[in-house]
Amino acid sequence: MITVENLSKTFYNKENKSKILTDINLHIKQGECVILKGISGSGKTTLLSIVAGLDKPSDGKVLIDGDPISKLPDLFASELRAKKIGMIFQHFNLFEHLSVSENVTIPLIPSGLTIKEVSKNVERALKIANIYHKRSLVSSHLSGGEKQRTAIARALVANPEIILCDEPTANLDKENSLLFIETIKELHKMSKTIVIATHDPLFEKLDFDNRIIPMVNGKIVYE
Amino acid sequence: MNEILFSNQVIIYLLSEATLFFLLFIAFIISVKILIKWDFNSFSPTQFKLEKQAYLVSTITLFVFLIKFILLIYFVFTVDSISVLVPGAMCGAGVITANEYGTVLLGLKFLLLALLIFWFYLQFYDTHTKEHLYFKHKSWVFLAIFVFVVLELFLDFQYFLNIDTHQPVSCCSALFGQLEGANPLPFGLNIPLLLTLFYLLYILVILTLNLNYKVVYIVSNLLFLYIAYYAVVYFFGTYIYQLPTHKCPFCMLQPDYFYIGYFVWGFLFIGTFIGIGDVLSSLVIGIPNLKYQKITSYFLSLFVLLCTSYVAVYWLKNGVLL
């Protein structure tokens, strides 16, 4: 499903160059749940961004179902991301002035689906994320946990095979973090491929199949 | 230094052209490097760097394309507006022929616009393939564009530096009039034959475009452009000026004629270049379908309609033709 080969990422400043990722090799099977674990600055978010095609590597390749997302022109990378990848961010990235259902609808705008199909998909995603009852509320009026559930619904609305989560519980209290993990468990049951970048210890003892990959200084310590 | 070079319009124009040249020069250096080292199938750091740089080149060229289009209109406006400084010139026609560089420069600008439109098509097709299949085609066209831009900048400076404000020039009445009795029309045509050819070629262009006869379309459209120029200057223009002896491609750009010349020439050149660029790129790339047949048809039809309407309105108002 996701293959990462000899991936490196270097950022260049005026005189310095900082290597964020070094020679990453990784294979994630369909339906697998992978936890990228590491402290801030270990390269988790950069790796996730490159896997999502939001950033380009400096060396190496990322294949999503055989398609080299890191080499695709913007048009095709966006298309692949829209069809196959759902993303959940640490800061939720919601449009604060839009309602919950409007936020969840946004990824479907370029999809070409009919209004009826869009409504059906939005309703389904809102129910999976357990935020259907707040669908008419403006996002700015939601709590942190509710915002995260809206973000989950938005990531699920296009029914992607892959869910990428970047520090999804960093802005949540313990109760809401546990609720998030329950939702992830449900998604895992639905055979979604899930990659979570986190340093939250709650993800160390999940009660469903998962693989923890520790990252230190841009390298995978072991796999 | 002549006073032409210090007029506001010329300073703005030359500074803009020089800035675009500077941007294109950067893009040119990068393009040469890209053409030498490009290997899209490689996942090496060099290739990733080249892909980023290729994106920069495309962005610069798209920006230049947009600004060059505006600058072409501004150049015509500038030439027209400095006619007050050149003795004998009443419009851009006198200024453009004030030295040997003007006409060549104007022609080069149209050629550049055509090349930029062609590049734009190649860019469109290239970014719609997963493997950037037309990247090298696009880069070679870019290199050609750069060579012409160098020549254009040289001619720009030569042209504006060498306009003598003390030397009287011939303006439109002498340049396009029939003072010596010779027939100025091509192929020995007279006005009725010129008009017949004008409308027949227009129909042929629209037909060949919509029937996808690509080579015939290119030939007929170029011929239409040539004939249309003469038809506007020697027939339709006289209805715009409402004066049978006034034959000029430039005066219609002036406020006295509501700047209608910008629309007349704009519709003709944009329609022609979009159509030819579309067909040429589809021939080069080998794809059967054209992208912008409708836009080309609309622009050329608007051109023909606009020209014809001046004659029709004059006839309806006065009951006679000029």
Image (cartoon, rainbow, N blue to C red):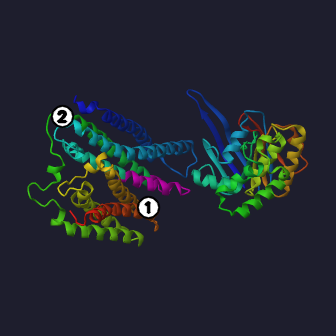
The residue lying at 70 percent from left, 46 percent from top is A25
Query: Which residue is labeled 1 in the image?
Result: B295
Residue A38 x, y percent position in the rendering: 78, 36
**Magenta region, mostly helix, strand or loop?**
helix
* B132 drawn magenta: yes
Viewer can see residue A130: no
Residue B154 x, y percent position in the rendering: 28, 39
Residue B58 x, y percent position in the rendering: 47, 46
Secondary structure of the residue carrying numbered label 1: helix
| Range shown magenta | B114-136
| Relative depth, front residue between B266 and A124 | B266
Tell me the amino acid under the disc marked 2.
Thr
Tell me the amino acid under the disc marked 1.
Ile
Does residue A85 appear to the left or right of B66 in the view shown? right
* Residue at mark 2 shares a chain with residue at mark 1: yes
Compared with residue A7, is residue B183 higher up or lower down, i.e. above or below?
A: below
Secondary structure of the residue carrying numbered label 2: loop
| Relative depth, front residue between B297 and B156 | B297
The subunit carrying tag 2 is: B
The residue lying at 23 percent from left, 40 percent from top is B83
* A40 drawn magenta: no
Numbered circle sitting on residue B165:
2
